[in-house]
Image: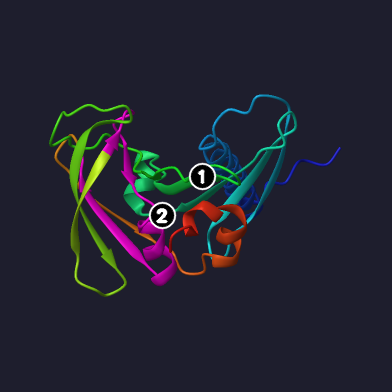
Amino acid sequence: MADKVEDPAFELMMRKLIAIYVLTASSMISLSQTIAEPRGEISVVFGLAGGKWQKVMITDELTGELSTAYSLEAETSATDIETGRHPRIAFSCQKLGKFDHVRIRTGTVIANQSHSVSDYSVGWAQVSIRSDDHEAKTWIADIAKNGSDLLAGKSIISDFLAHKKIEIRFVTASGNTITDEYLTDGLSIRSLKADCPSFFKGR
């Protein structure tokens, strides 16, 4: 029997493919978790929503209710790879229901500047947001109960549609300043109108 010949280039390629598979699976699981738990059996369809945006459509077979979740991963930095942090923007909506919060999933605990607790928040943080090459603006964002998600209203989706790139800067609980870059270009307004009609009511 011939000795097994190891190909370093092939082995490296396989490792990269496995890493991509794991990250993709993790992304899809996180994306589907933004949708409220259905009452019965479900059918799931994954798709693209323009540019780098992903979406998953879940139909509750018992009620016929259709929910859709949108997600955009931040551009990966060397620090994110080292820490295993996978920041993303995520929001979901129901065909016949109201629009929920946009979640900026930072992947780390955020410095809480006010411990005013509500039904959906544990406080707020001062965040800097910059669109394309425009001047950065200060944004007071609610912090979700998990301590690591920033919550925004549906108006921020207008920024996603109008700009090619958005940078979000915030301070972590340990005092570090993090800037996450999102390439928002390409989000399909046609897809949004079909999946999230409540977003466009009153506009």
* Mark 2 residue type: Ala
Q: Toward the viewer: 159 or 110?
A: 159
Q: Earlier in the sequence, mark 1 or mark 2?
A: 2
Q: Toward the viewer: 176 or 196?
A: 196
Q: Is residue 10 left or right of residue 69?
A: right
Determine whether 117 is above or below 49 in the image: above
Gap between marks 1 and 2, in whole Å? 18 Å
Give the SS element for disc 1.
Answer: strand
Please name which of the two marks, 1 or 2, marks the residue nearer to the observer: 1
Specify the quadrant of the image occupied by residue 194: bottom right
The numbered mark at residue 74 is: 2
* Mark 1 residue type: Ser
Residue name at image x 36 percent, y 57 percent: 155
Specify the quadrant of the image occupied by residue 183: bottom left
Question: What residue span does the magenta drawing correspond to?
Answer: 143-172
Residue name at image x 62 percent, y 46 percent: 56
